[in-house]
Image (spheres, rainbow, N blue to C red):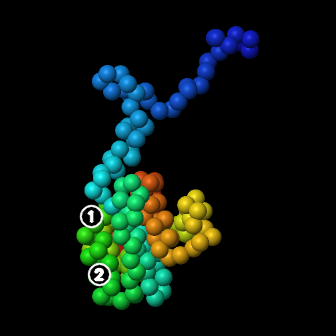
Amino acid sequence: MPTGYRAERPRAPISERPADTSIDHRVLPHWAISEEADRKDPTIRFGGVDWATDAHAIAIVDEAGGAVDEFDIEHSAADLEELCRRVDKWTVGGVAIERPDGPVVDALLEASFEVVVVASRSVKALCERHGTAGNKSDRSDAYVLADCLRTVGHRCEQGRTSSRPG
């Protein structure tokens, strides 16, 4: 086919997204027709734990990304129980952490929380996105982990932990 006939040349689709419409034929916003629509629940919170040897920082964010609770716990059995109590108080839908094993993960799994492992390099990139890369603190890392779970948690399926590591 000659290249001069643009009207006859096959074209790629403008969008890969299906053209879903509502009853009155207005195009629905992307969040209403995606996986993210299932996560839009204003009562669900998301947790992030910045793991350390002696103490751990925890942040809990709401659906809008606002911090609703931030606290630190020591690495002891009593404080791990306190962690689970406080996370349960906020109806947390999942907890993001960089480490896939250890007493913190075990305590969260035993309390029936969904634990999502986020790679350290991803957290580093997210800190840069949040503007906290040069101002590193354990609480800001915990916030970034919780916010990561809130915004892109549906993409972390392969990192989900649903039972105690063997």
Element type at mark 2: helix
Residues 159 and 128: in front is 128
* Residue 140 position in % (x across, y down): 50, 70
Q: Amino acid at mark 1?
A: Thr
Residue 116 at least partly seen: no
**Residue sitting at 63 percent across and 70 percent down?**
134
Taking the image as shown, residue 4 lies to the left or right of residue 119, namely right
The reply to whether callout 1 and callout 2 are in contact (CB within 8 Å) is no
Taking the image as shown, residue 4 lies to the left or right of residue 135, namely right
Q: How many circles with numbers are drawn on the protein?
A: 2
**Residue sitting at 38 percent across and 45 percent down?**
35
Residues 13 and 141: in front is 141
Taking the image as shown, residue 29 lies to the left or right of residue 86, namely right
Disc on res. 144 = none
* Residue 4 position in % (x across, y down): 74, 11
The Cα–Cα distance between marks 1 and 2, rounded to whole angstroms, is: 15 Å
Of the image marks 1 and 2, the number of the one nearer the N terminus? 2
Disc on res. 82 = 2
Residue 35 vs 147, above or below: the answer is: above
Mark 1, other Cα within 10 Å: few <14 / some 14–19 / many ≥20: some
Residue 84 at least partly seen: yes
Mark 2, other Cα within 10 Å: few <14 / some 14–19 / many ≥20: few
* Residue 14 position in % (x across, y down): 56, 26
Residue 54 vs 25, above or below: the answer is: below
**Residue sitting at 31 percent across and 64 percent down?**
92
Element type at mark 1: loop
Residues 52 and 11: in front is 52
- Looking at the figure, which quarter contains the N terminus? top right
* Residue 105 position in % (x across, y down): 38, 76
**Residue sitting at 46 percent across and 67 percent down?**
143
Disc on res. 91 = 1
Q: Amino acid at mark 2?
A: Glu
